[in-house]
Amino acid sequence: MSPCVCWLQLTLALLLTLAAPGRGGGNCPATCLCPDPHTVDCSARGLTRLPEGIPLDVRRLLLSDNWIPRIPADFLVLYSDLVYLDLRNNTLSRVEAGTLSTASRLVFLDLGSNNLTEIAQGTFGESRSLIKLRLGNNPYLSAVDEDAFLGLTSLRELELERNALSTLHVGALSQLPSLRLVRLEGNPWVCNCNFASLFAWLMDNRQKLPNDIKQPIRGQGTPARLLIGLPSSGAPDVDSEWAAAPPHRRHLTPKD
């Protein structure tokens, strides 16, 4: 076999290896899969921190079902092409203000099923491209600042179900001009003036609620409970949510 033919075969084999689905060549983090040039899938890898070596041109980053406790404030500075970020079912307790301010193209963000305790003002840094935001199933999430979602002018879907919210300032929702769907069911709401304002807003925006709780159903409680998805017997407490959580999310002691 001539040297030219041998070299051609080696070159072709290398190109086929780089193009094949799977790890995606040398640009893929060692513990992850890269099914296409712009997707990095590090789901369920037992990670305790963000992986190194993520390609700068990543568009879909999947990090769900790990043990990641925090996101460095400068993490997204280099990933200007990122449009889809899934951090569901980790151990995040907070997201520092400004962390997402550089994610100018981010459309989908899932922070559900973590240990977040509050959503402060500036958390999302006016991410004007964000369309869907999942914050549900955080059993310790008890506070959402009135301006937590300020600047999210493209946000269409907001999920805040099954958290520990006893109150929510109506301004957090009313300043979202593109909102089409909001989920609030399964929170331990307290009936006070803030709740009355929230209830009035929900009545005026019933079309933005999930289909299964838009209309009253006989025998399932008052309209207020129906609108926010509470059972007629009463609101669920945080401990019951904690007990039903996946085992790796029970690392914190339930609140008294």
Image: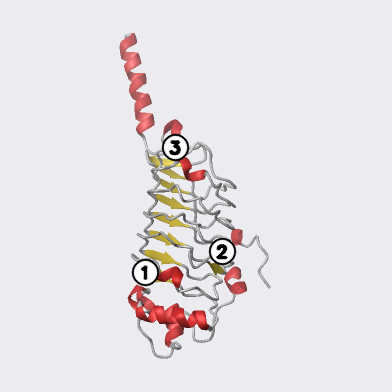
**Looking at the rendering, in which quadrant would you find the C terminus?**
bottom right
Residue 1 shows up from this direction: no
CB under 8 Å between callouts 2 and 1?
no
**Which residue is label 3 attached to?**
55
- SS type, badge 2: strand
CB under 8 Å between callouts 1 and 3?
no
Residues under labels 1 and 3: Cα distance? 33 Å
**Which residue is label 1 attached to?**
181
Residue at x 38% of width, y 56% of height: 130
Residue at x 53% of width, y 57% of height: 89
Does label 2 or label 1 sit earlier along the sequence?
2
Few, some or many C-alpha atoms within 10 Å of disc 2 (few <14, some 14-19, many ≥20)?
A: many
**Looking at the rendering, in which quadrant would you find the N terminus?**
top left
Q: Give the image location of residue 203, x and y in percent.
A: 38, 81
What's the residue type where badge 1 is placed? Answer: Leu
- SS type, badge 1: strand
Q: Quadrant of residue 170?
A: bottom left
Q: Is residue 244 above or below residue 126?
A: below
Does label 1 or label 3 sit earlier along the sequence?
3
Few, some or many C-alpha atoms within 10 Å of disc 3 (few <14, some 14-19, many ≥20)?
A: some
Residues under labels 3 and 2: Cα distance? 31 Å
Residues under labels 2 and 1: Cα distance? 21 Å
**Which residue is label 2 attached to?**
118
- SS type, badge 3: loop
What's the residue type where badge 2 is placed? Answer: Glu
Q: Is residue 85 above or below residue 215?
A: above
